[in-house]
Image: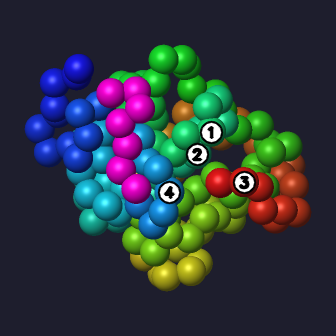
Amino acid sequence: MAEPTPGALTRGGRDDHVTVHGIRVYGLPVDLETRCVHWHEATDVVAIRFRCCGRVYPCFDCHEAVADHPAEQWPVAEQSAHAILCGACGATLPIVEYLAAEACPACAAPFNPGCRLHRHLYFAPGGPADWSVKLAKTEF
């Protein structure tokens, strides 16, 4: 069994998770608003359902720490998927809506603007003109 990471709510095993607003969040979360040992400022309240495995992690580093496979980017054609969890209120957002937002449209919790620097880890390149705006809800 993995040794606990200081401050984390899980031991960091592949199947360890916490439940945030009814959704399982894997990785190394430190609270029930999806902050983690890697990113834990007040505005770090977003978790992402990874395309490769369908599991929700607070960040890319959490996925790397516990998943047994490499992460995959969401392709532009699939960026209408509801893959974003607001840890503050539990709303699930389509990727296209999240990428255009500075705060959660459901509860107004601000998102960390620094996350824009890491978009390439989660989402394939392309601008809003390339994205499908059909906001079809997919299974979270």
Looking at the rendering, the stretch of residues picked out in magenta corresponds to 13-19
If you read the primary sequence from the N terminus, does the residue marked by circle 2 or circle 1 appear first? Answer: 2
Q: What residue is pinned by disc 4?
A: 23
The residue tagged 2 is 49
**Residue named by callout 1:** 54
Residue type, label 3: Glu
Label 2 with label 3: CB-CB less than 8 Å: no
Residue 63 in view: yes
- Which residue: 31% across, 54% down? 35
Q: Is residue 128 magenta?
A: no
Mark 2 or mark 3, earlier in chain: 2
Tell me if residue 112 comes above or below residue 14 in the rendering: below
Q: Secondary structure at mark 1?
A: loop
Q: Which callout, 3 or 1, points at the residue further toward the start of the chain?
A: 1
Marks 3 and 1, Cα distance to the nearest angstrom? 9 Å
**Mark 2 and mark 3: Cα distance apart in space:** 10 Å
**Nearer-N-terminus badge (4/1):** 4
